[in-house]
Amino acid sequence: MTHTLLPVLIMMLIAVVVGVVMLALAWFVGGHARTASKQEPYESGVPSLDENRKRVNVRFYQIAMLFILFDIEAAFLYPWAVIYREASTGAQGMFLFGEMLVFIVLLAVGYVYVWKKKAFDF
Amino acid sequence: MNWNDMIYILPEVILTIGASAMLLVPVTGGRGAKLSAKWMMIILLAITAGALIYCSHAVENIDQSRQLQAMFALDGFSIFFKLLFIGAIAMLVMLSEDFLAEGKYSPWEYYSLLGFALCGMMFMASGVHLITIYIGLELLSLSSYILAGFYKSELKSTEAAMKYFILGAVSSAILLYGISLIYGVCGSLNLLDIAAAMSTIVTNDALMFGIMLLGAGLCFKIAAVPFHVWTPDVYEGAPTPIAAFLSTGSKAAAFAIFARIFYTGLHDFHLEWNYVLATISALSMIIGNLAAITQDNVKRMLGYSSIAHAGYVLLGVISLNALGLRGILMYSVVYVFANLGIWATVLMLRRHQYAGERVDDFEGLSRRSPLWAFAMVIFLLSLGGIPPTAGFIGKYFLFAAAVQAGFGWLAVIAVLMSAVSMFYYLRLVVAMYLREGVEAEFAITTPLRIVAGICLVVTLALGIVPSSLIDQAVLSSSHVAAHAALTPHAGR
Amino acid sequence: MLEAVPTTEAYLMLSGTLFAIGLVGVIIRRNMITVLMAIELMMNAVNINLVAFSHRFASLEGQIFTIFIITVAAGEAAVGLAIIIQLYRLKSTINVDEARELNG
């Protein structure tokens, strides 16, 4: 157990040492010119047009929230679709189909609720 | 697998359909709005309970191991807990009436969320596969997060929801990581297969780590020290009926999966985990009870007391014998009824939103309503474990199980801490009987009276004539105990 | 040492690292959205574990569980975002530390 993790430990030590040494060298050897343009995110690029930490409208999160919820349900449809043709023989086929139908209906209940609650209206 | 197998989950199917329908009532036109959400919910719960009893008779003779590819067991253990959950939710529906009558919040959404939470709890009680248990747990947790923040316009409630959500989600992730490691070592997620795999392997680090993470996640769900910090805050901030739900039904469901996982799945590694759990149990009892003494807010006090009660129930898991399993079942019943009675009193004293929850508010209750004060004394004695009440029977079984399993020192701590707990329970009694109260208005409504009456009758009846509960617990736990290779009559 | 297919141990190290990053993120970050992302990271670490083990055992159980976890994680994110929106409406902040109504 211990000897297998030893290389990782050595690597982490080296990483820390290298990082500290490089930062320290830059601090001691390099000059310190604190001008306004030094403080900008892109020192030698085009001046930024806007703040990059702007507040996003809360409505955005509401849409995002609903999107993830309904989007992720496709995760269940894929495995079902892949095995459906092979597994659906006789009564078993109706069962598989019915199961997915139940799933879709439950999703539809959620969709109708969200829709009638006017969460899609802007 | 076919449609006939659906008989096993018929109660859950009915509950899901009903809860979904209730969700849609307020948004699809005005016709449904005339119906009473409360009575619809009561009827739904009654149908669910009926279906559960019908199903339990229908599947009695079927091979237990074949159930839904062994993901879902409809055995005595799960039926016992499911009936308890349905009863607890029915009483919570009665308790919620006043809170919803303020009219700011939609009762239909509230009750449908309670229905979904109940569905999750029922899956937890029946889960014999870690996927089923996890899905049930998440269904319960997600509903609880929303319910804790149900006072949308109150900052306190939203904050409680936020704290509960962050800590709950992190603990779920920790629990899952533990499950994934156990799967990696044992090669299965079914509890029986895990137990079979564990009987053939020797201790290894990955498995130990997995069990520890799983245990940590579960300890969060039952609010055991050191994973307890959320409890008092969430109980204080959440709407009072929801705090009652979190401390009774939701907690009993967590006890159920705790017992199921450790008794059915992990019993072979007993020696590896029992001392860790014993430490957690001792800490929960000590810290929970000592912190409760200093609280002036009754909801916070009940929060700390529920931490201590999680510690007592852990005794049943640690001892890993038939007696301990019976103790868990009985204590869940006893705890739910006594606690709901106290919450009913807190709700009665509540004048608007958050008032009526300080210890001072109980002053002079014996003069204003002698019968209610008497019921309150019985509930408090039951939580403290004093003889003529049901709490004594539950504690007796748990402590005896611990002694039998060689954890005498833990039983001593438990008895000492029970004595400490009487100190703060009696504080309420003193406030009710010996102090002059301000003539504050309070409203004893019929639903509250019914709930308190049921709790009082159950608490006293089970305390004086405990044999029916004991017999039922023995019967219900036998299937699970058999899997844990315990002798069914040990310790009787 | 180089192999064409990563070993299960390699996946375990990856997932352990991701899980640790997530846990540290939850503890030190104060912005609710970041905390939410850290929680998602922890859950995805679990998914990596499950899929790696599932591959090793050639059993589907782990992969099925992964699909369920992905779905639950989405539900959890939705509920979390809803709580954040509510908190923002009431307080105009989503900083965890500034929520101090309850003593704790």
Image (cartoon, helix red, strand yellow):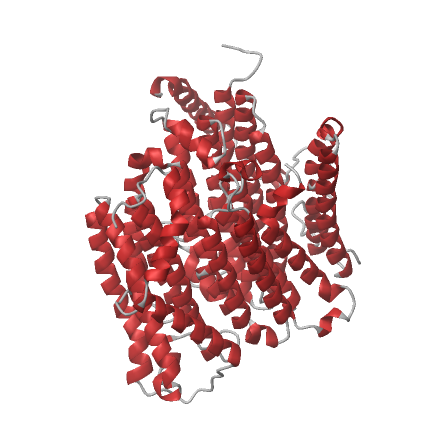
Q: Is residue B484 above or below residue C57?
A: below
Q: Is residue B146 above or below residue B131?
A: below
Residue found at x 69% / y 41%: A72
Residue found at x 43% / y 75%: B453
Q: Which of C32 and B282 is in front in this view?
A: B282
- Residue C79: percent from the left, percent from the top? 61, 52
Q: Nearer the viewer, residue B145 or B296?
A: B145
Q: Is residue C63 above or below residue B397?
A: above
Left or right position of B33 against C43 = right
Residue B405 seen by the camera:
yes
Numbered circles on residues, count: 0
Q: Nearer the viewer, residue B482 or B314?
A: B482
- Residue B430: percent from the left, percent from the top? 28, 79
Q: In which quarter of the image is residue B405?
A: top left
Residue found at x 38% / y 46%: B478
Left or right position of B428 against B447 = left
Residue found at x 46% / y 31%: B193
Q: Quadrant of the N terminus of chain B?
A: top right
- Residue B434: percent from the left, percent from the top? 28, 84
- Residue B431: percent from the left, percent from the top? 32, 80
Q: Quadrant of residue B318?
A: top left
Residue C94 seen by the camera:
no
Q: Please, which residue is most extreme toward the front here?
A: B61
Q: In which quarter of the image is residue B296?
A: bottom left
Q: Which of B461 and B291 is in front in this view?
A: B461
